[in-house]
Amino acid sequence: MKIDNLFRDTAPPLEGERFETLLSHKGLLIERIISSPRIAATEYIQSQDEWVVLLQGEATLDVAGEQIELKAGDYVFLAAQTPHTVQKVSDGAVWLAVHLHHP
């Protein structure tokens, strides 16, 4: 058994985002994401469902053309094939993303 902490080593990268797999098991992927405010606005259209919570910081997402403002503690469910883009994020934002891959 390994015990770790979501807030260990949360220094943001110089640009972009750092994705770290915390658990991958039977179609489930849980990852921690650390964001820099210097990100490229990349549109994601994923084949899996995703539930994401912003643990620390603030962010603006575009989800299927709708602007969503998030602050620490806010979460959103992104169904598979839903286009979404991180438009703006605070320095050192910490996310927890849960991906549900269907067989």
Image: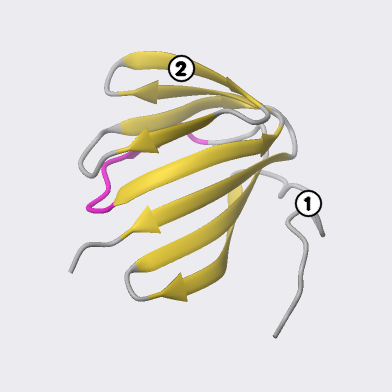
Q: Is 63 on the left or on the right of 5, as rendered?
A: left
Look at the image and tell me in which quarter the C terminus lies: bottom left
Q: Is 21 on the left or on the right of 72, as rendered?
A: left
Q: Which residue is drawn at 46% across and 73% down?
A: 24
- Give the spatial CA distance, label 1 vs label 2: 24 Å
Look at the image and tell me in which quarter the N terminus lies: bottom right
Q: How crowded is mark 1: few (under 14 residues within 10 Å), some or many (20 or more)?
A: some
In terms of depth relative to the viewer, which is nearer, 101 or 60? Answer: 101
Q: Is 24 on the left or on the right of 17, as rendered?
A: left
In this view, which residue lies farthest toward the bottom?
1
Which mark is drawn over residue 68?
A: 2
Q: What residue type is labelled 2?
A: Ile
Q: Residue at x 58, y 28 (%)?
A: 74
Instruction: Indicate the position of residue 80 as horizontal and vertical percent values.
Output: 23, 44
Q: Quadrant of residue 88?
A: top right
Which mark is drawn over residue 42?
A: none
Instruction: Indicate the position of residue 10 as horizontal and vertical percent values.
Output: 78, 51
Q: What residue type is labelled 1?
A: Thr
In this view, which residue lies farthest toward the front?
1
Instruction: Indicate the position of residue 16 as horizontal and vertical percent values.
Output: 59, 44
Instruction: Indicate the position of residue 21 as horizontal and vertical percent values.
Output: 55, 67
In terms of depth relative to the viewer, which is nearer, 9 or 24? Answer: 24
Q: Residues within 10 Å of mark 2 (few under 14, many from 20)?
A: few
Tell whether position 47 is magenta.
Answer: yes
Which span is picked out in magenta? 40-48
Classified by dominant secondary structure, the portion drawn in magenta counts as: loop
Q: Quadrant of residue 71?
A: top right
The residue tagged 1 is 10
Looking at the image, residue 17 lies above or below residue 28: above
Tell whether position 24 is magenta.
Answer: no
